[in-house]
Structure formats: structure tokens, C-alpha cells
């Protein structure tokens, strides 16, 4: 399909689970999370869902949108709706 897909954090998920998945994405997942640091272009909005969406989507795009690369133990989901954050990685 030509539909763009994105990986976003589920705002309904437990924030501790989202944070753990974010830590994984920025560590073993090898996502460059430096743009999320305070004062960097992607630090706002400064909340775990926004930051996790950035990291999850970056990982998902890096993995060529492969099945299972947007789950993060159930705290993320694939959407065709562009989260329209200027900071999301696109391919």
C-alpha cells in the first residue's frame, strides 16, 4: 500500500511501561534520542507519550516498518494518521 504508517505511543497505556519502552528504544534499540533532550528541537511537548512516539516511530521507520517493530510490549500501535509532529522521523 502507499499509505504512510507511523508508530505512536498509546496515550492510554501505563506511563511506567511507556517510559521503560522509551528507555529501551533510546538504548538497545539504538534510536538517536538526542533531539528529545531539554533545549533541543524535539523536547516539547515534554511528556513521556510525545517523547515515546518520537522514539517508537524512529525505531519503526529504521526497521523498515517490519511487522512487530511497533509494539513495545503493547504500549505502541501503528496508525495511518500522521502525528504531525515536526520531529517525527519519516522515510
Image: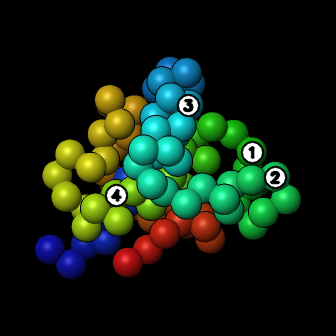
Determine whether 86 is above or below 20 in the image. below
Spatial distance from mark 3 to mark 2, Cα to Cα?
16 Å
User: Which residue occupies 14% across, 74% down?
Assistant: 1
User: Which residue occupies 19% across, 58% down?
Assistant: 66
Spatial distance from mark 1 to mark 2, Cα to Cα?
8 Å
Q: Are marks 2 and 4 in contact (CB under 8 Å)?
A: no
* Residue 36 image position (x, y, % from top left): 68, 55
Q: Are marks 1 and 2 in contact (CB under 8 Å)?
A: yes
Residue 60 is labelled as 4
User: Which residue occupies 32% across, 30% down?
Assistant: 74
- The mark that comes first in sequence, 4 or 3, is 3
Query: In this rendering, does residue 57 appear at all?
Result: no
Q: Residues within 10 Å of mark 3 (few under 14, many from 20)?
A: some
Q: Pointer 1: what residue?
A: 46
Task: Give the structural element (helix, strand or loop) at label 4.
Answer: helix
Q: Pointer 2: what residue?
A: 38
Spatial distance from mark 2 to mark 4, Cα to Cα?
24 Å
- The mark that comes first in sequence, 3 or 2, is 3
**Residue farthest to the right, as pictured:** 39
Determine whether 36 is above or below 41 in the image. above
Determine whether 50 is above or below 1 in the image. above
Q: Pointer 3: what residue?
A: 19
Amino acid at each position: 500500500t502507499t499509505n504512510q504508517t507511523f508508530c505512536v505511543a498509546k496515550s492510554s497505556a501505563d506511563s511506567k511501561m511507556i517510559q521503560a519502552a522509551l528507555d529501551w528504544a533510546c538504548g538497545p534499540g539504538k534510536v538517536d534520542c538526542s533531539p528529545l533532550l531539554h533545549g533541543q528541537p524535539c523536547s516539547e511537548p515534554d511528556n513521556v507519550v510525545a517523547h515515546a512516539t518520537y522514539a517508537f516511530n524512529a525505531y519503526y521507520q529504521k526497521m523498515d516498518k517490519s511487522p512487530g517493530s511497533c509494539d513495545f510490549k503493547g504500549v505502541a500501535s501503528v496508525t495511518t494518521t500522521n502525528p504531525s509532529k515536526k520531529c517525527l522521523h519519516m522515510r
